[in-house]
Image (cartoon, grey):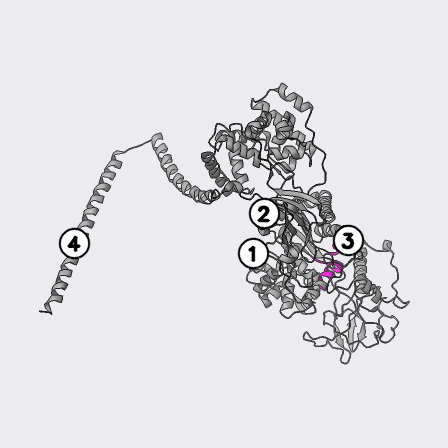
Amino acid sequence: MTDRKPEARSRTLARRLLALDAWIDTAAYATGRRLAGVWSRYQEALGRFRVRGAARVAAEVASEAATLGTVAAVVLLAFAVPAFKATEGDWRAKGEYAVTFLDRNGNQIGRRGLFLDDTVPLDEFPDSLIKATLATEDRRFFDHFGIDIVGTLRALTQNLRANGVVQGGSSITQQLAKNLFLSNERTIERKIREAYLALWLEANLTKQEILKLYLDRAYMGGGSYGAAAAAKFYFGKSVRDLTLAESALLAGLYKAPARYAPHVNLAAARTRTNQVLTNLVDAGFMTDGQVAAARRRPAEIVSMSREAAPDWFLDWAFEEVKRIAPKESHTLNVRTTLDPEVQRAAEAAIETNLRQHGPQYRVTQAATVVQEPDGAVRGMVGGRDYGTSQFNRAVYALRQPGSSFKTFVYAAAFLNGYTSKSVVPDAPITIGNWSPRNYGRSYAGAVTLKTALTKSINTVPVRLAQAIGRGAIVETAHRMGLRSELKITRALPLGVAEVTVLDMTGAYASLASGGLAATPFAIDEIRATTDDRLLYAHRTDEPAPERVLPVEVAEQLNDILANVVTAGTGRRALLDGIPAAGKTGTTQAYRDAWFAGFTGNYVAAVWYGNDDFTSTKDMTGGSLPAQTWKDIMARIHVGAPLKPIPGVAPPDALVAAAPAPTPETAVPAVSRDRLTEGGADVVGEIASLIRLRRATGQIGFEAQQHAPVPPAGSLAAVASADAAVDAPAPVVRVLSTARREPASHSGASISTPLPTVLEAPPPPPVPATAPPATRVQGPLPARLTAGQSPFGPAARVNGFEVLAPPPARSPSFIELVP
């Protein structure tokens, strides 16, 4: 009996499952029959629907429009979601910082934020100001729903006729949406969000409220927001008392306050005012007679300082304030790191060089950042004219750095066992289908890393990247201060990854500081305006700088970069009596040109290029950028006590180490009129190298034939193959005196004390039987690097024979690498 109950339950369950299966099958069949019937009737209806000719074309167009419209609506809805998120919370109070900026000396240099006066009711604004605003910005403001389609088409037509922008297409509501919720970037995404937010404002506010907000929140220049604050700033009076001429001037500021502000460009402001008066007549708000008096007697602004504000620096500093300032106070006094003298020097150098040489090189823009080795930014120029473009190219423009990026490649190599004396072949190399070439399309053979970076050879950093890995280069560059994404590609060592001027300055500052991180900063102190309470201090609230490079690595790089300035591609940056180090950079097709360098006091990076990425006319980093860098540095070092560069001896010590010339070592004067232009250039370069080597405490001798034998132990033999960067380098071969055959070094070398360079005049003609080679006496534990291609008679040094240049060549040097 007990065994039958489970069997009965199993049969019952089976019957129920079978019934469920039958129901599902029946329902599916019935549903299919119904759908088939519907489809059949739909097909019959389509069979009876016959459209031909123009009606069919219209139907097809309508069908496609409906399809595309549906897709567009979905896309627009995707943009609408983030736009409407901006309206959440108390959107009227967002971002209402009011910041007064001071320079490093405590003097006011500008204001940013919401310095507004919204206490004046709309009905107390002068009728002339409201009419001037509507006539210029949105004549159909009270007739449209937030987006003025008719006004946009009219503005487009007027702009085409004038071949320029004389009317704006955005309504006042759209402009208010941008001012309240969005940035000034010119993108399709921003315009779509602006349109949605304009519709939202129209749905939630009255026309009077929108107009009042616009008059109170529009930026009017000089750090003032709103017409009431601008009336006090420019005219020293209440907005209620404005005349027609003054109202027209203020209404002309909405379009471009930095360009038309009367305290910046009075002539442009009055031209714009006349245009506003014309708009009043064209819109029918006033007659010619009513505006005639305002044309004859233009508005007069109150007396104020004419010195231009460091606007690019202030824009960046304002963003930094919003990032680091405590949230409990929004009215702030901020002491910045800006030095007005440095700022003026940077602005003057950029403007002067662009004005004088810009057309020659077909370059229109430049940017620079000047900071101290600890990271304090003393000056910033983000472009040529802030009134024309407020985009800060020093902070936000990502451009390829070219060869100035090689510094990070060599830093990574030094961290992985290489030194400045390491020898790497400069020879053709192919990676896949990519074969990098040098600027001069020639190769120098085996070179030291110091020579390779000095001459900006391309194949050597590529080989280094292959050896140490490109990931190590990216890691080193980021640790030194580059913050942008550096994509790992085969051409990475040649500077194809994009960086900013600000980051390049900070990264090079890590070398000037001896290997410590030097992240650029603009803010020293932040205090509350109401009670002068200290809210932030950089010296106490920021961590101590971390070490990003060992001291010895930073010093090796600094020594090479100093050589770049004195004997390499950066000779135009050479400063009189001031040690300097740096690196040039030039990108493909001459789109970008850089010079990044430093002294013991300041670090600066200079960039030149065009906003549309068009090529310049053969501009290299060693031309205008290096010259601009020199102009800035020469001015800001006047009267300043010089600080040393780690790894580069200061001038006083170097001069003291250089011995006075003797009759045996004196170099005869060369008359310039006996030299060709190229010869004069070579001699000049040699002289620069002589000054450098004398300045670095290196001691040497003249390696020439028939020279008197120096006293034992007094001199070392030196010559330099990179004195003239653009000329073919002389070649060195090291011979064994015992067997007169090339010595086998396999990269090995013999050490010597630090050498110096003395100029070697051309040797006399070599007779048929060459006299014995000059022997150099003295304790010279020499370190000689094997070279190539013998020239002729030689001087012997500790069992090695260094071949001298042939008689027909210009004065040259041979380098015995220390």
Q: Position of residue 373 (x, y in %)?
A: 69, 58
3D distance between C-alphas at marks 4 and 3: 96 Å
Crowd around label 3: few <14 · some 14–19 · many ≥20 (10 Å): some
Identify the residue shown where x is 58% and y is 31%: 120
Going from N to C along the chain, the mark reached first, 3 or 1, is 1
Q: CA distance from mark 1 to mark 4?
A: 63 Å
Disc nearer the start of the sequence (4/3): 4
Name the residue beneath numbered marker 2.
329
Mark 3–mark 1 Cα distance, whole angstroms, equals 34 Å
Vertical side of 409 occupied by 86: above or below:
above
Residue under circle 4? 22
Of residues 496 and 15, the one drawn nearer to the viewer in this rendering: 15
Furthest toward the top, the residue is 289
In the picture shown, does residue 677 fall above or below 82? below
Q: CA distance from mark 2 to mark 4?
A: 74 Å
Q: Which of the two marks, 3 or 1, is nearer to us in this view?
A: 3
Query: Which mark is on residue 637?
Result: 3
Which quadrant would the N terminus be assigned to in this image?
bottom left
Q: Amino acid at mark 1?
A: Glu
Q: Amino acid at mark 4?
A: Ala
Is residue 18 something that shows in the picture? Answer: yes
Instruction: Pick the residue in front: 413 or 540.
Output: 540
Reading the image, the residue beneath label 1 is 485
**Which stretch appears magenta?**
559-583
